[in-house]
Every structure is written in structure tokens, then in C-alpha cells.
Image: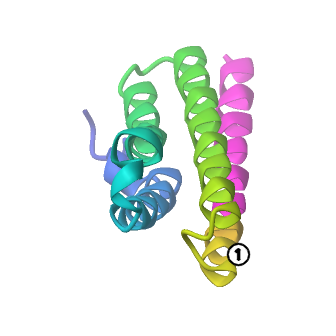
Amino acid sequence: MTDTFPKLEDLNVWKLCREIRIELIKISKRLPAEEKYILKDQMIRAARSITNYIAEGYGRFNYQENIQFLRISRGSLYECLDHLYCCLDENMITKEEFDDLYIRSQSCLKIINGFIKYLRNRKNEL
């Protein structure tokens, strides 16, 4: 790998999604004990897959595969958003916590979509 090729850790999309992953996992650890194998497990898996799929796609060094993994990552982010709605609806998080993570999720979605568009344009230039 050359010095001009950015590392995964340098990608803004990965960094921003990593931040939300950390917050989602913190919330999942506060969930009631009866949610341990239900919502908590699903939240952790979905939160981790957001950045996992970004990393996996990036490591493929192929525009189309990278785009596909970003789409899966985006789906995982939407899954996490639905889990947050469950937490809010069942009074496991406050409205303020929800609103903060909702806004941050929207930022992640925008940057994922922007990266997909960038990769699509680069692919079309070839």
C-alpha cells in the first residue's frame, strides 16, 4: 500500500460511524436484564456491523464491492435506528438520548451515501 492510499482509520465515514457504534453499545449495556438475549444482542451486532462492513468493503480494493458493503453498512445503521425507536418507545432511553443519536445517525447516513456516490463516480471514470 502506498503512502497516498488512506488507511481505514483515516476515512471520515469509518470514524463517524465508529463514534455512533460506541454510543449504541454503551446504551445496549444499560438495557434491562430481560433484554440481554433479545434487543441488547441485536443492537450490539447491528452496531458493530456498521463499521465492520465499511472495513470489509474498503479492504476489497474494488469499487463495486466497496459500494455493496457500504449499502449493507447503511442497512445496519437503519437497523440500529429502529432499535433506538424500540428503546425510546419502551422507555429504556430518554428522548434527549434518542434525539442526539438520531441526528448523529443522519450524519452517518449522509456520509455513507456520499462515499457511495464518490465511489460510483470513480468507478464510472475508469
Q: Residue at x 71, y 70 (%)?
A: 103
Q: Is residue 77 visible?
A: yes
State yes or no: residue 109 in magenta.
yes
Q: Residue at x 66, y 21 (%)?
A: 123
Q: Position of residue 112 (x, y in %)?
A: 64, 45
Residue at 32% across / 46% down in the picture? Answer: 7
Q: Quadrant of the C terminus?
A: top right
Left or right: 44, with 75 as reference point: left
Q: Which residues are magenta?
A: 105-126
Q: Position of residue 34 (x, y in %)?
A: 38, 51
Q: In the picture shown, does residue 73 fall above or below 97?
A: above
Residue 108 sits in which quadrant? bottom right
Q: Total of numbered circles in the picture?
A: 1
Give the SS element for disc 1. helix
Q: What is the crowding at mark 1: few (fewer than 14 residues within 10 Å), some, or many (at least 20)?
A: few
User: x%, y% of residue 43?
Assistant: 46, 46
Task: Identify residue for label 1.
Answer: 99
- Residue 108 can be seen in this image: no
Depth check, front residue: 31 or 114: 31
Q: Is residue 26 magenta?
A: no
Which color scheme did the rendering employ for the protein?
A: rainbow
Q: Quadrant of the N terminus?
A: top left
